[in-house]
Amino acid sequence: MSTISLPSDFEWGFATASYQIEGAMGAASLSGIYFAILNLQEQKGANGDVACDHYNRFEEDFDSLSKYGAKAYRFSISWSRIIPLGGRDDPINESGIAFYSKLIDSLLARGITPWVTLYHWDLPQGIHDRYGGWLDVEESQLDFERYAKVCYERFGDRVKNWITLNEPWIVSIFGYATGGNAPGRSSTNPQCAEGNTATEPWTVGKALIMSHARATALYNRHFKASQKGKIGISLNGDYYEPWDSQDQRDQQAAERRMEFHIGWFANPLGDRLPRFTGSDFALLREADMDFYGMNYYTSQFARHRNVPAAETDFLGNVDELQENKQGVSIGEKSGVHWLRSTPDLFRKHLTRVYRKYGKPIYITENGCPCPGEDKMTCEEAVNDTYRIQYFADHLDAVGRSREDGSDIKGYFAWSLMDNLEWSDGYGVRFGVTFTDYKTLERTPKRSALLLKGMFEERMNLDTSNPQSRAGDIGSDEPRPHI
């Protein structure tokens, strides 16, 4: 039994993203076109044309949410479904509005709170073709502001929780530095035909920062008082430990890496970003967020580099490693190479972010694939012991960070179902529901049915006299297991 409590009003549920599950991609998005090409090149034949067919099966999927006991559900709206060409003067697609209205109404009828992400990587192709998308700082922020306004106007009477952007670091770096994600621009990746890794990620970063600021300021000015909602952003970022704990240069490298990962967007200052004007800063001050959305999966070691940083560097001139100087692993291996289970460092990460930024935290993504799960049959995959332990350990880390003084209000497991994992196609499985991609049949995994009990166990504990652990972030006390 766990001894780490959560408050009785803690909000929890599951998360998804439109392109990864919906299918029925009538309006072209940049991610849709790019990933179809990318995956065909890699002989995966995967794209989002059908995905999990959530567009036609959402009632079934929401029945699963109810069965799993979810209090809340985080999903994203496809910009292309709302405004197919994307621009502020382009027509609205009323059938897209109707689809998301049905989703929202269906959730509310079940007593499940909707959490809406406005942008989860699916830029309308029309915007990219028209002016280069996020590479045009001025145009893109104005088009995003209008798209946000339409969503507030059409859904804000029922949606009280808004997330402007999902993981802008991934958009900037994977899309415009490494070229692994849409639109596949890079000057260091030989498979990419165009791009400038030294400059474009930072231009895109500013476009995303200002788009978030415009959408947030708009909500604060014209919608919050009447709709009584809240708004924030979801930032991804690993926690970094020094590769050599005795080397001050590695200690500095770990902190610098987190600034390049999170600080870039949470506190947008730096010489490599395009210059912010006085009016930019005025807008940023007006865009006060209600919460910090955290997407967390793993941690790493950071080792300083003894060479000058290249102009294409986006890591902070560090090496990222999964073993330290003594060869000790950062955590237990999962079913994907970049993710190891690191709950103790999750605690440190939560506490660091809360102390640094002072905003209530909602964990908007956290999850893992089990070792070998991509090769398992349904009958094998549903017994997802590794995922069950991952969730239990990370929920205890949330409770411990709260004891450090962090204000953590909610948690969304990634993901409700196995889905299209971007450039990994339909191989890696993060879902608590097994998806048969041939028949589209869904089967609950054990983790889906046990999560409710994990939360109830922690939320039912007596919290009237919580033992303070302030300052004890690095405690060696063993974590209780379920």
Image (cartoon, rainbow, N blue to C red):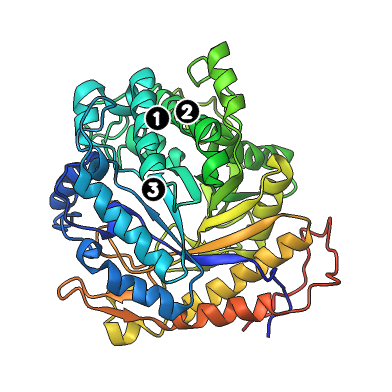
For the point 59% across and 75% down, the residue is 392
Give the residue type that dot 3 points to. Answer: Phe
Q: Are marks 1 and 2 in contact (CB under 8 Å)?
A: yes
* Amino acid identity at mark 2: Arg
Q: Which residue is mark 2?
A: 214
Q: Which residue is mark 3?
A: 155
**Circle 3 or circle 2, nearest the eye:** 3
- In the picture of the structure, the residue carrying the numbered disc 1 is 145
Q: Secondary structure at mark 1?
A: helix
Q: Position of residue 314 (x, y in %)?
A: 47, 32
Q: CA distance from mark 3 to mark 1?
A: 15 Å
Q: Residue 10 falls in which quadrant of the image? A: bottom right
Please tell me whether mark 3 or mark 1 is closer to you in this view: 3
The amino acid type, in three-letter code, at marker 1 is: Glu
Q: Quadrant of residue 283?
A: top right
Question: SS class of the residue under badge 3?
Answer: helix
Near-viewer residue (300 or 75): 75
- As drawn, is 381 to the left or to the right of 1? left
Q: Quadrant of the N terminus?
A: bottom right
Residue placed at 60% from the left, 75% from the top?
Answer: 455
**Badge 2 density bin: few <14, some 14–19, many ≥20, Cα 10 Å:** many
In percent of width and height, residue 333 lies at 48, 68
Does any portion of residue 30 appear in the rendered image? yes
Considering only order in the chain, which callout, 2 or 3, is on the residue closer to the N terminus? 3
